[in-house]
Image: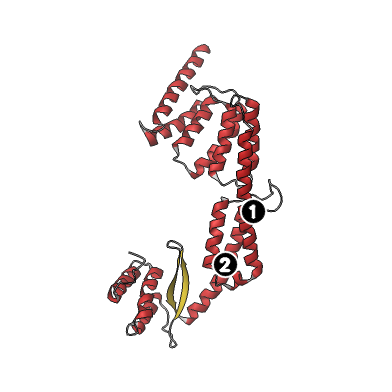
Amino acid sequence: TYPIGTGTKDAELVAMGAWLYGEKENELANRVLTQVHERNDELKPLVAAYICDKEKWDLPADGMKLWNVWDIEYQKERQILVTPDEYEKRLKEREKAASDRFKELLRARGDYKGRPPRRNQPTMQLVLVEWEIKQFKIKFGSSDFLKDTKNSDKLQEILDSIKDDLAVIQDNLEEARKKVTDSGNPNQLKEKAEYMEGILTIDPEDMNLRSQVANAWYAWGNPAPHGNGCDRAEGIKKAIPHYERILEVFPNNTSFLLAMGRCYQALEDSKHARGYYEKVIELDGTKGSGPTAKALIRNMDQNDANRANKGK
């Protein structure tokens, strides 16, 4: 397994490195063999020659150089052996990669100055942008790009803005809850749903937040308990796009599949409702939301039959 324990024998490390090269896991193989190179002077020239052979590099007369790589899985910096030429090549590539990734993170954050809604909204959930920036700072910490205070200050500014926006979201969610003092008052329910839409513009890729917006519109729409019809079709129609977006991210979440089915059944769109209900039954069977989906299909079929008879 990887990573290797400090007590592992050199012979075992060499064997594992050779096996990893055979599996085309070149960087992992290099990491393992680099440990042998750094602690065993007798094997050092043999390891360097072997790595150069596997990587198709010319063995340098002045020896190999250590290159630091960030292990995102184990959240730790590792070392690999490279030739001086490869070292210089990687330096240039790292600077370009840092610049490119920096631009991607700026786009993912979107506009963050001024009051929301802002023109360019985030394309990634804010907590994920925050995490990616922290990873970026670790991975490219020794790069000239990040040593430039203009760039490092910009990243800190973005991190601060995310912290501020997340706090604003929590404050606004509390305000949204206060808007409904009577769950049977449709005006209050609508006002809450509209207010929630504004909150979502701050962090539109937060699917938990989006589900709260969808549920707020659903509550205002108020589908009938048996599934057929609703009090306010507009609310149901506004909930659907939010549930659809959530299902793009979590396609097998039966709670949201059931909600979509109920929305379409409330709008008397049996074809679309059935598709979602059947997916729920396929995933949950006789457990979870499966029995509810079956019962709603029965109610829907009976309602369709009644309408058909009235039309005769």
Residue 106, given in percent of the width and then of the height, sits at 62, 58
Residue annotated with mark 1: 110
Query: Is residue 32 visible in this depiction of the protein?
Result: yes
Q: Is residue 289 above or below residue 122?
A: above
The CA span between labels 2 and 1 is: 19 Å
Residue annotated with mark 2: 98
Residue 164, given in percent of the width and then of the height, sits at 63, 52
Is residue 210 toward the left or the right of residue 40 in the image? Answer: right
Q: Residues within 10 Å of mark 2 (few under 14, many from 20)?
A: many
| Residue ID at (31%, 75%) | 14
Q: Is residue 36 above or below residue 116?
A: below
Is residue 31 toward the left or the right of residue 168 in the image? Answer: left
Q: Secondary structure at mark 1?
A: loop
Question: Which residue is nearer to you in this view: 155 or 183?
Answer: 183
| Earlier sequence position, callout 2 versus callout 1 | 2
Q: Is residue 225 above or below residue 199?
A: above
Quarter of the image holding residue 288?
top left
Q: Of the residues shown, which amino acid type is indicated by label 1?
A: Gly
Residue 49, given in percent of the width and then of the height, sits at 36, 82
Of the 4 image quadrants, the one containing the N terminus is: bottom left
Quarter of the image holding residue 160?
bottom right
Question: Which residue is nearer to you in this view: 229 or 140?
Answer: 140
Q: Is residue 311 above or below residue 117?
A: above
Residue 125, given in percent of the width and then of the height, sits at 56, 50
Query: Which colour style is shown?
Result: secondary structure
Identify the mark at residue 227; answer none if there is no mark: none
